[in-house]
Amino acid sequence: MPRITRAALVQAAFPGRTDAPLEAIKKAAIDRHLELIGEAARRGAQVCCLQEVFNGPYFCAEQEERWYGLTEPIPDGPTIALMQKVAKEHRMILVVPIYEVDLPGVYFNTAAVIDEHGRYLGKYRKHHIPHCKPGFWEKFYFTPGNLGYPVFDTSAGRIGVMICYDRHFPEAARELGLAGAEIVFNPSATVAGLSEYLWKLEQPAHAVANQFFVGAINRVGTEAPWNIGEFYGQSYFCDPRGKIIAEASRTKDEVVVADLDLDQIRQVRDTWQFFRDRRPESYTRTPALKA
């Protein structure tokens, strides 16, 4: 019997005011995402991934200690507890990216994975932390991830996660491929004029090189008062051959749903034997020649 997973991605604009109290900011974002998660469930999704730090704006456009107040422990914070109930209610696996506190002053950009019974399976912490113009000051907020590149066994397949800037590093995708990931989600927040030309280049290339499905998510709209650029949406799924099989618009809140034939992974790997033909013992850095 074919192994078909119906998967969903949620892209959305931040619906509230960034100068509101932090709890009001969280509530506005969560309420909107609950509507979109419900749509994914009605469309039959077995697994649904939300966007990077889904329960707030992309606050890394400035460097302000105020935003440390958005952090929550994982899995013992209120947002993950709520999402566990939501996952159980909809019988749907959820990938939930939020701002995590581990110890006082030690914060991570993290995605929790929750199964369709509401059970917390584990988390991925973003490894690669940018700090660059025009407003991606993430080293002010996030400690580099320290939990490796876990792959989660679920009823919808073996799921891996990268977060936003991780997608620029082929080593991260390779780690997930070697660990047996079948679907890799990449929740992101990125704006036009910086990385848009890479958006449909890098991740299909990861899918081809590692022969897995990729679900890439980007938020939409602009966020005042920073206005660092337009979050350009275009969330999509691509298959192990790098073909985009479902894609969202550039400007709208949207749920992208696609049926992923996980048997295709075996078919592609039997054709392109990339894992067989790797030569890791030869991948050593050549010392620079002396003048």
Image: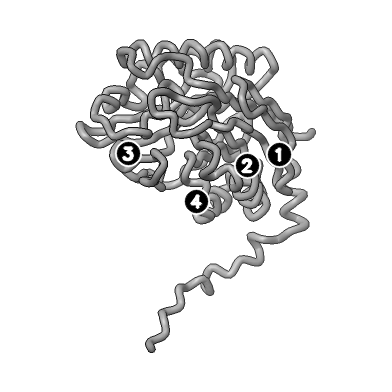
Label 2, label 1: how many angstroms apart (C-alpha)? 7 Å
Q: Name the N-terminal-most of marks 2 and 1.
A: 2
Discs 2/3, front? 3
Q: Name the N-terminal-most of marks 4 and 1.
A: 4
Which amino acid is tagged 3?
A: Phe
Residue at the image point whose x is 33% and y is 16% from the top? 19
Q: Where is mark 1, residue-wise?
A: 262
Give SS at disc 2: loop
Which amino acid is tagged 4?
A: Ala
Label 1, label 3: how many angstroms apart (C-alpha)? 34 Å
Mark 2, other Cα within 10 Å: few <14 / some 14–19 / many ≥20: many
> How far from the left and from the top, in percent, is residue 7?
65, 28
Quarter where residue 289 is shown: bottom left
Q: Nearer the viewer, residue 115 or 96?
A: 96
> How far from the left and from the top, in percent, is residue 202?
60, 49
Query: Which of the numbered marks, if any, corresponds to residue 172?
Result: 4
Q: Where is mark 2, residue-wise?
A: 182
**Is residue 148 left or right of 35 when viewed as pictured?**
left
Q: Name the N-terminal-most of marks 2 and 3.
A: 3
> How far from the left and from the top, in percent, is residue 187?
52, 34
